[in-house]
Image (tube, rainbow, N blue to C red):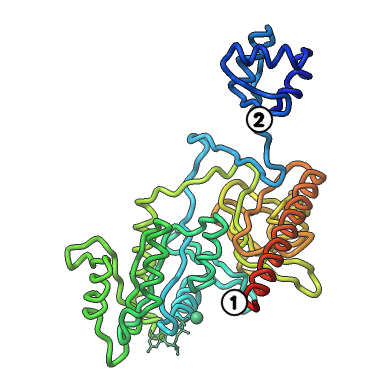
Amino acid sequence: GEPLTVKELAGKLGREVSEVIKKLMMLGVMASINQEVDLDTATILAEEFGVKVEVLPPEEDPTEIPEIEDDPGSLLPRPPVVTIMGHVDHGKTSLLDAIRQTHVTATEAGGITQHIGAYQVNYQGKKIVFLDTPGHEAFTAMRARGAQVTDIAILVVAADDGVMPQTIEAINHAKAAKVPIIVAINKIDRPGANPDRVKQQLAEHGLIAEDWGGDTIMVPVSALKKTGLADLLEMILLVAEMQELKANPNRPAYGTIIEAQLDKGRGPVATVLVQKGTLRVGDIIIAGTAYGKVRAMVNDRGDKVKKAEPATPVEVLGLSDVPQAGDILVAVDDEKKARSIAEKRLAKKRSEELQQAQKVSLDDLFKQI
Ligand code: GDP
Ligand code: MG
């Protein structure tokens, strides 16, 4: 794909430079020895000399892993992945906790559940995955990295406080990501609760309640009193059903890092939401600039598991380094390749950071002048 100079072209064609220049002149192109010739001209020229030209596809980026295309016939239904958004103190954490306490089957040993950043709820025999990272920061950070993990956004609005700046931000984020919004009008137990005022305010931002003739589902809830939770879960399943969410479980795993940290005893620990394929213990994986072999996996109940299918969040042990939230994780077949890609990514990242640092210091310099 790189353009060649007349001299290089002559070399490749095994002709004298003067001959090439003459031929180019006949084609109406005036070129000197060190001038570059574009691909089309070079192709015509080569054919004039009786040389067949084959144009190769552009070289692959060594830091990219090509995506696997899934045959539509390989896709099977998968659970929805839900994110909770809304203004601070409107009850995001409380709502997640209430759903979790009410609808997560506790494990034998006293119902102690593991905090891994995401969890599965079982409602009427159907699974729903909740991302336990409330706030738009996580959502935006992931989207900025090209990761689309959410199928449905729950917008929590406190009935006694109404639409606030972060409510509007959340609406905008969900709209930008083309994720359907279900509104949870929370704190309806409060004396000052006014759900109609919330609907009025949301209508001003384009979200019209169904009972007002619009198409936005709004569910009154109280995270404190644990009321309306079943209605909310039912609506989530309803919206999910219309989305016909599917994934191919029978292929190498593809997922997104939800959160990650360095654990003193266990090393880098990352919560992965598997989105396609099945992740297994022993798989060779790469996530951002980290790579490794899956040493162990732990689910949201704290149980060790051997495999994780689409829409399953799991803690993964065995990475070389701590990846970032939003990094894509893929299983690959070759450890050497995984390592080489991770190293190239790291080198690229370092040089980008260096360039950024230099730019910043130049800016500072100019500021001082
Ligand atoms: P977040 O910032 O959106 O995560 O909000 P929190 O879940 O931390 O809740 C903020 C405050 O509102 C806490 O004091 C909660 O106890 C309270 N709260 C949350 N949900 C309800 C509710 O349904 N009713 C009442 N009365 N208080 C609630
Ligand atoms: Mg919170």
Disc 1: which residue:
111
Which residue is drawn at the image coordinates 68% and 8% (left, top)? 49
Task: Kindly indicate the quadrant of the structure image that contains residue 40.
Answer: top right
Amino acid type assigned to the residue bearing label 2 in the image: Gly
Which residue is drawn at the image coordinates 52% and 37% (left, top)? 74
Amino acid type assigned to the residue bearing label 1 in the image: Gly
**Above or below, 54 relative to 367:** above
Give the alpha-carbon distance from disc 1 to disc 2, as whole Å: 61 Å
**Above or below, 340 relative to 297:** above
**Badge 2, how many Cα within 10 Å: few under 14, some, many 20+?**
few
Mark 2 residue element: loop
Task: Kindly indicate the quadrant of the structure image that contains residue 65.
Answer: top right
Percent of width and height locating residue 179: 40, 58
Disc 2: which residue:
1
Q: In which quarter of the image is ligand 1?
A: bottom left
Mark 1 residue element: loop
